[in-house]
Image (cartoon, grey):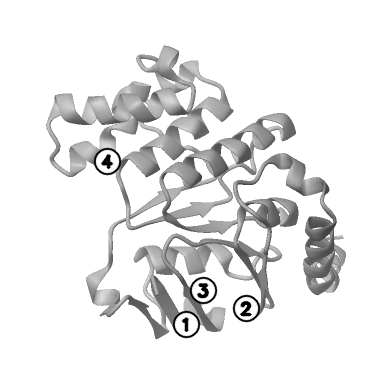
Amino acid sequence: MEFECRDLCKVYSVQGRPVSTLEDVSFTVMRQEFVGIVGPSGCGKTTLLKIIAGLVKPSSGRITFGETDTGGQPHNAMVFQEHALLPWLTVLDNVAFGLEMQGMKTDERHERAASFIEQIGLADFADSYPYQLSGGMCQRAAIARAFVADPYMLLMDEPFSSLDAQTKLVLQEELLRIWGEHKKTVIYVTHDIEEAVLLSDRVLVMTGRPGSIRREIPVALPRPRTLLANESREVKEIKWRIWKMLESEVRQSLELKR
């Protein structure tokens, strides 16, 4: 077992009133497993990710990492919807930033960062700054920065949602390739059901406000995977199964916004 969430609840105070975001969330993640989390807006997916990362404390419940509770928070890396690269640093120094925080010497961290930069196809842009890159290139650099720091686990919050469809497809394949070479435990939050199925070993379907896990859906597709897997009957069946769990809640949310 990599870690276990048990009966997690989160209540925020909004204008002096309690607002519950998560309720009785429980699941287990195994080492090197790629777990997708899908659900409608407002069901607490990002809050759950932040609790796992140690950025937010649960109101009740606990997380156990192996034999260690949350007091022994392991090293993790996060990749957000926006790349969050530091604009005053080059691609090389951005990718190496986590290693610098770990105290690694300049030559060593640059060598390790350069290797990852080459893997993601940005070797010719190592000395460029974020403003000189496309959105997709910045996200590649953000993914490289996460992996090069050798985290215990990788937490990803809709990292490709702001990209155009073609770039998104390319980066999905890049992520699958890099994950295949550097197996890490990954928790991947997305609104995109197809993306979750393509990438994950298992998909957690969240619903409700406060959010809870309605079901865990295994994705028994062989690896390594490519985008061609999207055309398989198995993927289409899993996508439809997940959508039917979410459809009524999504439609209701749209009606409220009219």
Where 197 falls versus 253 (above or below)? above
Q: Which residue is mark 3?
A: 14
Closer to the N terminus: mark 1 or mark 3? 1
What's the distance in space between the residues labelled 1 and 2, CA to CA?
A: 11 Å
Which quarter of the rendering shows the C terminus?
A: bottom right
Task: Find the distance from the CA under tag 3 to the CA under tag 4.
Answer: 34 Å
Circle nearer the viewer, 2 or 3: 2
Horizontal arrangement in the rendering, residue 127 relative to residue 21 (left or right): left
Residue 105 percent across, percent down from the top left? 12, 31
Q: Nearer the viewer, residue 26 or 237?
A: 237
The residue identified by callout 4 is: 98
- Where 144 falls versus 232 (above or below)? above
Among numbered discs 2 and 4, the one appearing first in the sequence: 4
Q: Which quadrant would residue 176 be assigned to in this image? A: top right
Q: CA distance from mark 1 to mark 4?
A: 29 Å
Percent across and percent down for residue 236 are 83, 57
Any part of residue 16 in sight: no
